[in-house]
Amino acid sequence: MATDATSKKRGVLFDVDGTLIDSSYFHAMAWWQAFRREGLDVEMSAIHRRVGMGGDRLIQSLVPEPSEDLQENLKSSHSAVFSTFWPSLRTFESARDLLAACSEAGLAVGLASSAQDRDLEVSRRLLDAGSSIDAWTSSNDAKESKPAPDILEACLEKLNLSPEDVVFVGDAVWDVKAGSAIGVPVIALTCGGISEAELRDAGAAEVYDNPRHLLENLENSLIGKLI
């Protein structure tokens, strides 16, 4: 979904889970329980490394030749378990302020999320960012999931912007790869649990601890160069 087409000439795209919302480990737990329900013993650390991929890619990278029924059962179980964690979800410190600062500086703000609609709605309510957000996407907006760039392209289309007009802020290696695929520079945050070294090795242009750390350095960041 989106608001009316923005006339802003530059913008910032934000991943949501693990970037603005402290949810990466809840997703790892939900997938772990989903695998267990199907009799599959998958290490939590292996799951966490893949959070940020689409569910289909995550499953295929951890389960040899999964059947369609198994994939659907796993995704359904993950969704059901993750919903039980909704009351525990919190925004990272200064996430709302970061969105507001970008908007007030004249930049279009897009949530380039591949979450399911109902999970994204929970996140948007938690962010409570109102008019600071110009557009957002969900899993329904992309044919291929990250690290494919489909969700970024969908968000760009809603903002009426081109890759050279934006910066993408994410927390996972898959975010960095998605941005790189279409030439969008990526600012990575380590608050999703991935190390600075891994994010830089993947191609992140800048790395900060969390939204507060990025906000404190906004003027000197890639976002500051857009303003």
Image (cartoon, rainbow, N blue to C red):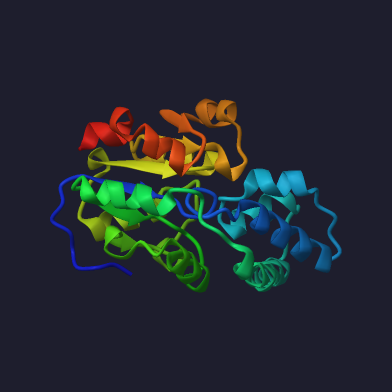
For residue 192, side relative to residue 8 (left or right): right
For residue 131, side relative to residue 121 (left or right): left
- Give the number of callouts: 0
Q: Tell me if residue 223 comes above or below residue 82 in the rendering.
A: above
Nearer to the camera, 190 or 204: 190
Q: Is residue 38 visible?
A: no
Residue for point 66% across, 43% down = 49
Residue 188: x %, y % from top left: 47, 37
Q: Quadrant of residue 66?
A: bottom right
Q: Tell me if residue 88 comes above or below residue 47 in the rendering.
A: below
Residue for point 50% across, 63% down = 115
Nearer to the camera, 123 or 141: 123
Residue for point 47% across, 52% down = 20
Nearer to the camera, 149 or 114: 114
Residue 8: x %, y % from top left: 16, 51
Residue for point 75% across, 65% down = 34
Q: Quadrant of residue 179?
A: top left
Where does the N terminus fall, quadrant-wise?
bottom left
For residue 143, side relative to residue 86 (left or right): left
Q: Is residue 159 visible?
A: yes
Q: Tell me if residue 123 comes above or below residue 207 in the rendering.
A: below
Nearer to the camera, 23 or 46: 23
Extreme-left residue of the structure: 7
Q: Tell me if residue 91 comes above or below residue 117 in the rendering.
A: above
Residue 143: x %, y % from top left: 44, 61
Where does the C terminus fall, quadrant-wise?
top left
